[in-house]
Image (cartoon, rainbow, N blue to C red):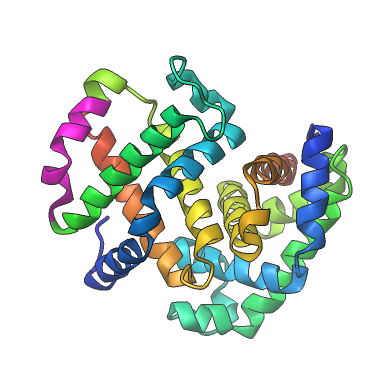
Amino acid sequence: MSLINSERAIVKSIWDKISSQADAIGAETLERLFCSYPQTKTYFPHFDLHPGSPQLRAHGAKVLAAVGEAVQHIDRMPSALTKLSELHAYILRVDPANFKLLSHCLLVTLAARFPADFSAEVHAAWDKFMSILSSILTEKYR
Amino acid sequence: MVHLSGEEKAAVAAVWSKVNVDNAGAEALGRLLVVYPWTQRFFDSFGDLSSADAIMNNPKVKAHGKKVLHSFDDGLHHLDNLKATYASLSELHCDKLHVDPENFRLLGNVIVVVLSRNLGKDFTPVAQAAFQKVVSGVATALGHKYH
C-alpha cells in the first residue's frame, strides 16, 4: 500500500494547516487514547497522565513532531523513519495493535478541530498515511 | 451488555441530542465507502461509487446510511440488552447479507469520527470513550448470531 500523488498532496496541505497547533493536537490525541483505551496507559507507568500534565503535553508534541517529520519526507518514509522504527522494535516494543488506536484518536482530534477541512477525501488520505506510518514503525519487530 | 458510568451515560445523551441522525448516517456510510473502498463490495447495486464526491452525494448511500444510524439509535436506548435488540439484524447480516463482522468495527469508528467532526469540542475525550464502548457493543451484538 502506498500513497498516490493526490493523497500526498492532501496530507501535506492539511499538515500545513494544522502544524501551528501540533503540540495541542498531540496532547489531545494522547488524552483521547488513554481515555478510550485505558490499556494503553500501561506503556506510561512513569508518567503523570492527567489531562494538562506537562509530561502529556511534551510527549504529545514529540509524537506529532514525528508525524510532521514523516510528512516532510513523505516520498521516502521508510528511510526517513529508520531510527524511529528501530526504537519501537527494540526498545519501546509497543504492541502493534496500539498503532491503530493512536491513529484513530489522531483522526478524531483532527475532525474535531478542523471540521470543514476534514472531508471524506482528507479522512481517507490521512487514515492511509497513518496506516503506512504504523507499518513502517512495526516493520522491524520480527 | 455495555457498562457506562453515570458520567458516560450523560455524555452519550448530551452528544446524541445534538446529532442530526439522518445526516450523520449518510456521512458515516459515505465515509466508510471512501476511506475503506473494499467495503463497496456489498453495494454493487448502489450505482455510481466512482469517486469520493459520487459516493458522498449518492442518494442510495444517503438513504441506507440513514437507515443504519436509526438502527444504531435504537441500540442507544437498549444498552443493557444489545444482543436481543440486534438478534434478527445479526442473523440477516450473516445469512442473507454475508457481511464480515470486521466491517461493523470499521463503521463504528467512522461513526465516532463523524460525531467528532460534527460536535467539535463537545465531543470530549470522555464522550468519545463512552461512544467507543457503545460502537464496540453494537458490533459485538451484530456478530453474535453468526455461525
In the rendered image, residue A85 lying in the magenta stretch gets the answer: yes
Q: Is residue A48 visible?
A: yes
Which residue is found at the position 19% from the left and 56% from the top? A72
Which residue is found at the position 21% from the left and 49% from the top? A69
Q: Main secondary structure of the magenta part?
A: helix
Q: Position of residue A117 (x, y in %)?
A: 46, 71
Q: Position of residue B23 (x, y in %)?
A: 70, 74
Q: Position of residue A120 (x, y in %)?
A: 48, 70
> In the image, is residue B57 above or below residue A35?
below
Q: Is residue A79 left or right of residue A103?
A: left
Which residue is found at the position 51% from the left and 73% from the top? A116
Q: In this orientation, which residue lies closer to the viewer: B136 or A119? A: A119
Q: Is residue A36 left or right of residue B2?
A: left
- The total of numbered circles placed on residues is 0
Magenta stretch, residue numbers: A76-88
Image quadrant where residue A90 sits = top left
The C terminus of chain A appears in which quarter of the rendering? top left
The N terminus of chain A appears in which quarter of the rendering? bottom left
Judged from this view, the residue extending furthest toward the top is A46
Q: Position of residue B16 (x, y in %)?
A: 78, 57
Which residue is found at the position 29% from the left and 48% from the top? A67
